Image (cartoon, rainbow, N blue to C red):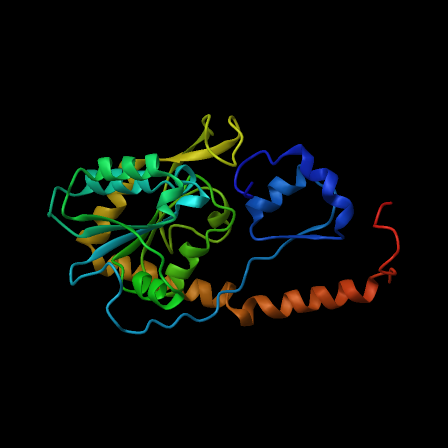
């Protein structure tokens, strides 16, 4: 089970004896963990290394401005919610009125029913492409760097790495205002979509029915997409602030020194235990 929904399983507390400390990628996940374990928990988001587009034509993009949404089907289509991305796009633009939407997925064979639903929602529109294909790292960077905007209508994210990588590349972002990404996102750097807490339905793999995530407002998402299309200069200003945010708070230079100092402090205070000795708490 991913660190995305509330509450975490009560069984997690039984594993505490194997650890001295837990590092969490976001304040959201830290809050979930504090309800289940008594270990020290440190919020330690991953550093984002500088991303360099190759400048070549990105897979799945033509000369037409394109909104990009990503989803690993094996990581739950319901949680990533590309269906919401299609619904927002269809609400925002009549056929061939504006940009294209590229729904880039992979592992589509893990959920053929979910994939068929996405194709049904697209309704055969020529301005919506659903591509089930693995991209290497360089291709993925090129895709996001060349996007008109990156769209994430997730129902829950522990951290939301693609969102912050898109910001690091200077792409405008439209994202659900809920869970892990909200540790850093605000309206100055991204178009935030209001969301309402909602129970996880029956039948979602890896997520217990009745646990909580959130349902993004598709109409508000559509308005955000329209605003990026009709006022690209304002969208670019917001994206530029997002790029600076990543450099200031998530670059290796910003994240690394604090983590190193913390590790050195912990090691200095650690008690040496023989490899054959009892586990902590035994």
Q: Residue at x 88, y 61 (%)?
A: 274
Residue at far front of view: 109
Q: Which of 46 and 243 is in front in this view?
A: 46
State which quadrant residue 235 falls in.
Answer: bottom left
Q: Residue at x 41, y 54 (%)?
A: 163
* Looking at the image, residue 256 lies above or below residue 130: below
Horizontal relation, residue 213 to residue 130: left or right: right
Q: Nearer the viewer, residue 68 or 15?
A: 15
Q: Which residue is drawn at 31% across and 57% down?
A: 172
Residue at far left of view: 96
Horizontal relation, residue 270 to residue 45: left or right: right
Q: Where is residue 169 in the image (x, y as percent from the top left)?
A: 36, 65
Q: Position of residue 266 (x, y in %)?
A: 77, 62
Q: Where is residue 145 in the image (x, y as percent from the top left)?
A: 31, 64
**Quarter the N terminus occupies:** top right
Q: Which of 99 and 250 is in front in this view?
A: 99
């Amino acid at each position: 089970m991913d660190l995305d929904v509330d509450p975490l399983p009560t069984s997690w507390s039984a594993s505490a004896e194997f650890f001295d400390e837990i590092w969490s990628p976001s304040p959201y996940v830290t809050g979930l963990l504090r309800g289940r374990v008594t270990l020290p928990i440190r919020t330690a988001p991953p550093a984002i290394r500088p991303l360099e587009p190759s400048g070549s034509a990105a897979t799945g993009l033509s000369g037409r401005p394109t909104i990009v949404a990503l989803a690993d089907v094996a990581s739950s289509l319901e949680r990533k919610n590309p269906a919401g991305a299609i619904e927002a796009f269809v609400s925002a633009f009549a056929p061939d009125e504006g940009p294209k939407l590229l729904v880039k997925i992979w592992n589509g064979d893990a959920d053929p029913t979910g994939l068929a639903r996405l194709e049904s929602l697209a309704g055969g529109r020529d301005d919506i492409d659903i591509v089930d294909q693995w991209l290497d790292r360089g291709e993925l960077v090129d895709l996001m760097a060349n996007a008109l905007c990156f769209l994430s209508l997730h129902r829950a994210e522990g951290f939301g790495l693609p969102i912050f990588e898109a910001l690091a590349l200077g792409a405008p972002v439209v994202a659900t205002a809920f869970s892990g990404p909200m540790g850093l996102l605000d309206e100055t750097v991204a178009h935030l979509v209001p969301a309402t807490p909602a129970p996880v339905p029956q039948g979602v793999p890896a997520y217990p029915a009745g646990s909580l995530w959130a349902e993004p407002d598709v109409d508000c998402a559509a308005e955000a997409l329209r605003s990026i299309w009709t006022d690209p200069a304002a969208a670019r200003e917001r994206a530029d602030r997002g790029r600076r945010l990543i450099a200031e708070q998530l670059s290796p230079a910003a994240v690394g020194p604090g983590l190193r100092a913390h590790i050195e402090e912990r090691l200095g205070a650690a008690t040496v235990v023989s490899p054959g000795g009892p586990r902590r708490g035994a």
